């Protein structure tokens, strides 16, 4: 699995309010994208190596003081089963915002949760990668 790691080359942008320069929104930390064809449908898969996990932890630690509210962002084609699986990965007290694309073809899910460490964030992304058809931003 090859990942394009946009945030590791320099500093990781912080969310400062509003929508940033990313097409669907902005996350609070590094963004990992699976390259097309790396997994079925080109979706994000579990990070393949401990080295990638360590780089992500390091980048998260550079921009967060733990505990911290972390914003997860996901995009997928609306499907109740997929939505239920994704929401089951987060505690009931997490703040969840749903937004459908203009044509209704995609659903954007933003989840804000207090995370205690970068390890928790990386582990959550690994669990989300098990939900087929979800793109993590």
Image (cartoon, grey):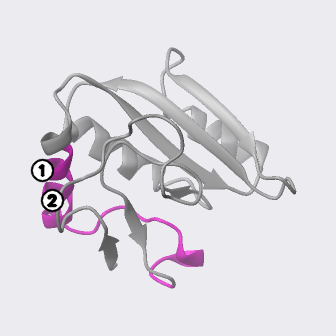
Q: Which mark is residue 114?
A: none
The quadrant of the image that shows the N terminus is bottom left
**Residue 34: x, y in percent?**
43, 72
Callout 2 touching callout 1 (CB < 8 Å): yes
How crowded is the residue under tag 2: few (<14 C-alpha within 10 Å), some, or many (20+)? some
Residue 4 placement: quadrant? bottom left
The outermost residue toward the right is 103
Residue denoted by label 2: 55
114 left or right, relative to 64:
right
Q: 19 or 96: which is nearer to us?
A: 19
21 left or right, relative to 56:
right
**Residue 81: x, y in percent?**
73, 44
**Residue 92: x, y in percent?**
54, 17
56 left or right, relative to 104:
left
Q: 52 or 84: which is nearer to us?
A: 52
Residue 97 placement: quadrant? top right
Residue 7 placement: quadrant? bottom left
Whether the magenta-drawn stretch holds residue 48 is answered as yes
Residue at figure coordinates x 21%, y 55% from the top left = 56
The outermost residue toward the top is 93
Residue denoted by label 1: 58
**Residue 102: x, y in percent?**
83, 53
Residue at figure coordinates x 12%, y 50% from the top left = 58
Whether the magenta-drawn stretch holds residue 66 is answered as no
The image shows a total of numbered marks equal to: 2
93 left or right, relative to 127:
right
Residue at figure coordinates x 33%, y 74% from the top left = 3
Q: CA distance from mark 2 to mark 1?
A: 5 Å
Q: Which residues are magenta?
A: 37-60
Secondary structure at numbered mark 1: helix
């Amino acid at each position: 699995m090859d990942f394009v790691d946009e945030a590791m080359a320099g500093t990781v942008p912080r969310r400062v309010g509003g929508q940033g320069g990313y097409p669907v929104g902005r996350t609070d930390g590094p963004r990992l994208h699976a390259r097309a064809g790396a997994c079925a449908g080109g979706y994000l898969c579990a990070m393949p190596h401990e080295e990638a996990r360590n780089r992500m932890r390091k980048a998260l630690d550079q921009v967060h003081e733990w505990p911290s509210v972390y914003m997860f962002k996901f995009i997928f084609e609306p499907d109740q089963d997929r939505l239920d699986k994704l929401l089951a990965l987060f505690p009931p007290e997490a703040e969840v915002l749903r937004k459908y694309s203009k044509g209704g073809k995609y659903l954007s899910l933003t989840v804000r949760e207090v995370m205690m460490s970068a390890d928790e964030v990386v582990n959550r992304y690994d669990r989300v990668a098990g939900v087929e058809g979800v793109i993590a931003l």
